[in-house]
Image: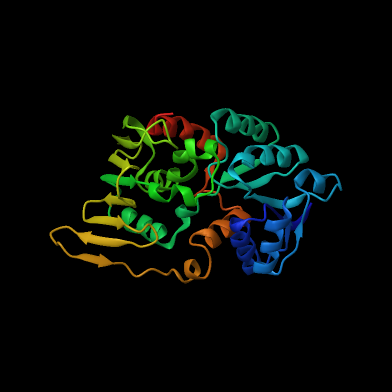
Amino acid sequence: MNDKIWLIGSGGMAVDYYKVLLGLGYTSVVIGRGEDSAKVFELKTGGQVIQGGLKYYLAQQPAIPKAAIVCVGIEQLAEITLTLLDYGIKRILLEKPGGLTMEELEENVVNSDSLDAKVFLAYNRRFYSSVLKGKEIIEEDGGVVSFHFEFTERSHQVHEWNKSKKVLEHWFLCNSSHVADMAFFLGGFPKEINCLTCGSLEWHPSAAAFTGSGKAETGAAFSYHANWAAPGRWGVEVMTNQYRLIYRPLEKLSLQRIGLDDLIQVDLEDDIDLRYKPGLFKQVKKFLEGDDASFCTISQQLENFQLYYRMAGY
């Protein structure tokens, strides 16, 4: 084993990860497939990409790294993770959502458990300065009483997303789960939930509008809503005894104090979120230091998929 970090993929997210790893003082081995993405990566970072794909690189029998970060296309996430586990890598940070089906996730759960490896989902919004500050406020005020979130997607831009039919048909998992994970991370994951969907879109036939409510493990009541056929944006609101915490956009935090109508913009220590992709620096730092408490494990993600399937109407 060596102290290098393998970065699997050379697209836009890989560029962001590479910059973070450089800022943290780690040496990266970047492994990509396509020539075009490798050229763009090298122009943006000054780093070098080993082309040909992961299996080509493994055929050279390189030393096992300290950890690997997987940020390939969504359809390849599960397969790449399996390959890394089979090679003997014990610590993996896996981009969201980790796979497109419960079967894909389950195979990686079984393999990681049998090999005593740790695989974590890279939900970087858990590490936003706004979220970390919100966690402090919630704890100081005695916990969450209720919360609400909205995950309306900008469907009018679907033609710009350049995503496959399979990915678009699972868009809740691939994109909206960012918001659901953040809301549940702040307020508590559900122990009871009622889900309703209606309508359909050409690219997302299972549903166009989503609504539901339930009770979290923390005892907090929650609700959610989204309509992908109407205007809207992502947002999370968390209520404590004294405050309403408002995340809209998610990177910012506003407070409404009980008895007052005015909103207070919370000053955040977010310099690191302005220098790098928000949440990414703190996420990678904790991952590489072995500080795992705030991460979603792949086993937890498999459980979450059962919930997300219900919410999305899959």
**Quadrant of the image containing the C terminus:** top left
Residue positioned 43% across, 34% down in the render: 308
Label count reads 0
* Image coordinates for residue 105, horizontal then vertical, percent: 58, 33
* Image coordinates for residue 275, horizontal then vertical, percent: 52, 70
* Image coordinates for residue 9, horizontal then vertical, percent: 67, 52
Q: Is residue 289 visible?
A: no
Pick the residue in front: 175 or 247: 175
Pick the residue in front: 128 or 79: 79
Left or right: where does residue 95 sit relative to residue 80? left
Pick the residue in front: 11 or 138: 11
Q: In this rendering, is residue 261 above or below 291?
A: below
Quadrant in the picture for residue 107: top right
Residue with the most extreme left position: 259
Left or right: where does residue 256 sit relative to residue 54? left
* Image coordinates for residue 207, horizontal then vertical, percent: 37, 33
Quadrant in the picture for residue 4: bottom right
Left or right: where does residue 86 sit relative to residue 139? right
- Is the image coloured rainbow, by chain, by secondary structure, or in one colour? rainbow
Residue positioned 70% across, 57% down in the render: 36
Residue with the most extreme right position: 60
Residue positioned 14% across, 62% down in the render: 260
Q: Is residue 20 visible?
A: yes
